[in-house]
Image (spheres, rainbow, N blue to C red):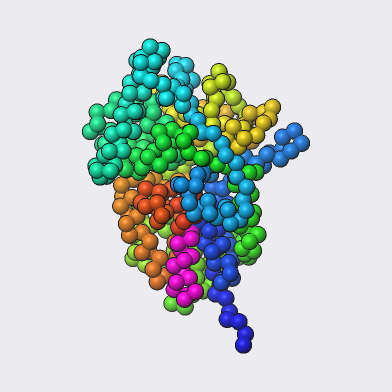
Amino acid sequence: MSAPTKPRVAVVGAGVAGLSAAYRLREVAEITLFDQEPRPGGHAHTIEVEDAGRLLGIDTAFVVFNRPSYPNLSRFFAELGVATRRHEGGFNFFDLDRGLQYGTAEMALPEEEVLARYPAEFHTIWREAHRFHREGRKDFLRKRTDLPLGEYLDRGGYSAEFRHGYVILLCTAVWSVPAELIWEMPATTVIAFFMAHDEGGLGGQRVDWRTVEGGSISYVRRVVAAVDPKLRLGEPVRSVTEQPDGVTVTTAAGAERFDHAVVAVHGDQARELLTEPSALQRETLGRIRYNSSVAVLHTDPSVMPADRSRWDNWNYGKVAVDGESRPYVAYYMNRLHGFTSERDYFVTLDYPLPVREEAVIRELHYDHPVIDLDLRTLQKTIYRVNEGARIKLAGSYFHSKQLHYDQIGSHEAGFSSGLEAAEQLLRELGR
């Protein structure tokens, strides 16, 4: 008796969600993997740079993870045999114009030392940061944080110095959103992140933060090799249409029939691709907003404080542009990836001034879901969108079920959504 024919599954989008779905389905389905980019990986985007006769893999979007907050991704890396490197967390705030700096060490000082050594502005930030983390935890447990962050800070009487000298800087790095959208975020999502990672957030030192050896491209290559799909890279999908007996995927090369599809692209892109969405798909995708950020990999140290001893893994800067103070993030990649080099490598996120042209290695544009109360509320029902449909949706606009509704927008959320989409399809196939 011949073996049953494997179903043909199109995976549209070769980012972490699509790779996750393809990997889970690899043994039971014939996979075709589409992506508009000429490379797989999505936000797992490593730029490989020649440096003194060696190749350095430098990540520009997904950089770090830890096992408690990325449980599915961590198990996945272990299964693939992906080598990772521990890095010590640490952050530094600095104002390029005024020279004010404070970071991990200063936030850990006793209050009397802060009063004696630092200006009143930092004392306000220090005092309110400690109050925010102390009271935020209590309010979270008492379910008093289901409101926009700006409103939560208003109710708590938090100062402008704290908002603009602490909250904006930390949050823009974690969620890659501009300052003006931070206040729309659910207070519960922000507080939950700090509860899970300690007061330093991405720079927390009580967390076992890790990076992928050689950059995240290392895991992407292992996944693609394990799945061995039909690769259709650099081939943008124009439409995905569900019929009662299959799915049609259309590109510039023509239309192709599949039994099922996993559409693992950004929610707004999925909205444009689906030609016959169900009412639930249309309603779900209509509530997803995105924000674009510009990341630049470069070697220009002018984005950093003049005092090199202040350089940390995560550097949150402010600089005046046209009379307005603008925040940005500068990742010091030598420290983040744990390599030594005579050249310093930085990834800046939404730096508001020009970087020296000769220092630029690559400029990249990334989109991230805007996390607001509407998106968080949507998480209560979002996975229903995949029930019974031949087209399954996946992306970081879904939450990780293991970590509840506040784990949205991360690599873990994207990976988990792809895994869940594949599991839903397997249940419906009786596998």
* Residue sitting at x 52%, y 40%: 209
* Residue sitting at x 46%, y 42%: 292
Q: Is residue 80 left or right of residue 409?
A: right
* Residue sitting at x 55%, y 75%: 7
- Above or below, 212 against 24 in this view is above
**Residue 34 in view, yes or no:** yes
* Residue sitting at x 30%, y 29%: 131
View extreme (bottom): residue: 1
View extreme (right): residue: 53
**Residue 268 in view, yes or no:** no
Image coordinates of residue 245 in percent, x first then y, are 47, 78
View extreme (top): residue: 116
Query: Residues in magenta?
Result: 418-431
Q: Is residue 297 left or right of residue 316?
A: right
Image coordinates of residue 14 in percent, x first then y, are 56, 56
**Quadrant (top left/top right/bottom left/bottom right) for the N terminus:** bottom right
- Above or below, 157 against 82 in this view is above
Image coordinates of residue 417 in percent, x first then y, are 45, 57
- Above or below, 146 against 229 in this view is above
- Residues 48 and 238: in front is 48
Residue 149 in magenta stretch: no
- Above or below, 368 against 162 in this view is below
Q: How many marks?
A: 0
Residue 429 in magenta stretch: yes
Image coordinates of residue 157 in percent, x first then y, are 24, 28
Which SS does the magenta portion mostly show?
A: helix
